[in-house]
């Protein structure tokens, strides 16, 4: 290993990889405004509120959900809501069989998720409109999908999964859709205040190290998030419009993803990166997931699990439960360089062999 590599390794070793975002270090907003900020979206405190507002307002007879999903969606719909029906997702996170389509009726709500930034098969969606099915495209993991290109009635975003802002969810409603938004109330101050402190403390930590109080604050604030009628904070709206260089963010995420895909092909969920995809992270599947995750924690790498569905989704959807027990999302976002990715690859390989 040459000296240069050693130096890079040392610098990178002092930071952690993963975890929630801090406020940006340089406020270098520039470039073109991305699609999710254009138009006139509803600005909400979080994305789950968008789901609740649609369900409350349109009262669909059935709510169709994919078997692989973020449990917060169930929280928004009501986990025991008798209207819930599932459609199966396979172990490549693709909709598995289209038989369920014949059971869809006018006025049903169908929520589909663009996993990790990879868009859902358009074949599924085309045709459902004519049937009168209400379509919600969940772009919470696909921030850079332009809602103008959607065939859905609603596109939902959760930008704090991609950049350092305290709160926020955005709901784009397709013009002409029959939907009246109730008036919103200001964001919940106690939660917002903790989230605000957390993103500042995480920024300080990234710059200077120190304790990890930000972690507890994030955790406590996130556990108090609920789906309701609260609006996005003005601070978040301002940051989203001013603080970020989205072109750079997209480019870095794609570069880092490509490096990981080259090195970790054998455990990757997605090997190819289509031109229009900006990834949330780099999901892998491994047998001893929990052990390897702990190993990575010990190297200061914090890959999350998207998602733990054991307590939520019926057991008969085996493919989804299998994915949930093996999946891990390696961070590849704009905070990290090629050197960080190289270190993470080494750590993953060490973890698999440990
Ligand atoms: C696919 C998906 N939909 C919805 C949500 C809810 O987003 P929020 O936390 O902004 O309410 C999440 C959150 O993780 C998600 O991953």
Image (cartoon, rainbow, N blue to C red):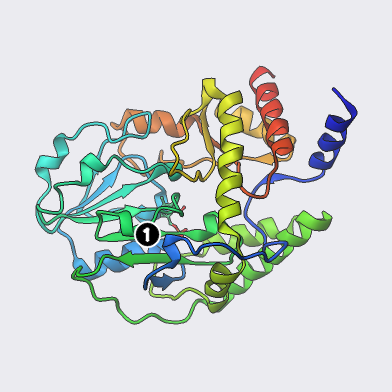
For the residue pair 19 and 138, the one nearer the viewer reads as 138
Would you say 123 lies left or right of 254 here?
left
* Residue at the (59%, 71%) spot, across then down: 242
Quadrant location of residue 281?
Answer: top right
Q: Residues within 10 Å of mark 1 (few under 14, many from 20)?
A: many
Visible residue check, residue 236: yes
Q: Quick check: 213 above or below 185?
A: above
Q: Could you tell me residue 198's position as x and y percent?
A: 67, 64
Q: Position of residue 8 (x, y in %)?
A: 82, 37
Q: Name the foreground residue: 325 vs 242.
A: 242
In the image, 54 versus 178, the foreground residue is 178
Ligand 1 is found in which quarter of the picture?
Answer: bottom left
Q: Quadrant of the N terminus?
A: top right
Q: Position of residue 209 (x, y in %)?
A: 82, 54
Q: Quadrant of the C terminus?
A: top right
Q: Position of residue 113 (x, y in %)?
A: 35, 47
Q: Which residue is located at x 24 percent, y 60 percent?
A: 153
Residue on which the image places disc 1: 156
In the image, the residue with mark 1 has its CB under 8 Å from the nearest atom of ligand 1: yes
Image: 9 above or below 155: above
Q: Residue furthest front?
A: 31
When the figure is inspected, residue 304 is found, relative to residue 235, above or below; the finding is above
Question: What number of labels is visible?
Answer: 1
């Amino acid at each position: 290993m040459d000296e240069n590599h050693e130096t890079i390794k040392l610098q990178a070793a002092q930071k952690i990889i993963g975890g929630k975002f801090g406020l940006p270090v340089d406020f270098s907003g520039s470039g073109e405004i991305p699609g999710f900020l254009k138009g006139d979206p509803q600005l909400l405190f979080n994305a789950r509120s968008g789901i609740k507002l649609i369900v409350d307002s349109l009262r669909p007879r059935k709510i169709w959900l994919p078997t692989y999903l973020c449990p917060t969606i169930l929280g928004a719909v009501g986990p025991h809501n008798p209207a819930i029906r599932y459609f199966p997702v396979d172990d490549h996170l693709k909709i598995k069989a289209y038989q369920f389509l014949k059971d869809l009726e006018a006025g049903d709500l169908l929520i589909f998720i663009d996993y990790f930034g990879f868009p859902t098969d358009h074949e599924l969606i085309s045709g459902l409109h004519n049937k009168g099915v209400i379509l919600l495209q969940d772009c919470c993991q696909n921030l850079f999908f332009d809602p103008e290109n959607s065939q859905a009635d609603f596109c939902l975003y959760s930008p704090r999964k991609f950049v350092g802002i305290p709160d926020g969810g955005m709901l784009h409603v397709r013009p002409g859709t029959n939907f009246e938004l109730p008036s919103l109330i200001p964001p919940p101050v106690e939660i917002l205040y903790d989230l605000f402190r957390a993103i500042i403390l995480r920024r300080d930590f990234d710059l200077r190290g120190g304790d990890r109080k930000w972690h507890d604050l994030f955790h406590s604030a996130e556990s108090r998030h609920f789906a309701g009628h609260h609006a996005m904070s003005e601070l978040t709206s301002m940051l989203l419009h001013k603080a970020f260089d989205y072109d750079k963010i997209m480019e870095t995420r794609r570069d880092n993803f490509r490096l990981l895909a080259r090195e970790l092909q054998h455990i990757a969920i997605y090997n190819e990166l289509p031109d229009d995809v900006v990834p949330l992270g780099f999901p892998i599947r491994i047998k001893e997931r929990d052990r390897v995750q702990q190993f990575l924690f010990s190297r200061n790498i914090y890959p999350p699990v998207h998602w733990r569905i054991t307590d939520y989704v019926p057991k008969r959807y085996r493919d989804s439960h299998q994915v949930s027990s093996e999946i891990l999302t390696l961070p590849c976002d704009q905070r990290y360089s090629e050197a960080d990715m190289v270190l993470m690859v080494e750590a993953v390989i060490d973890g698999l062999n440990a």
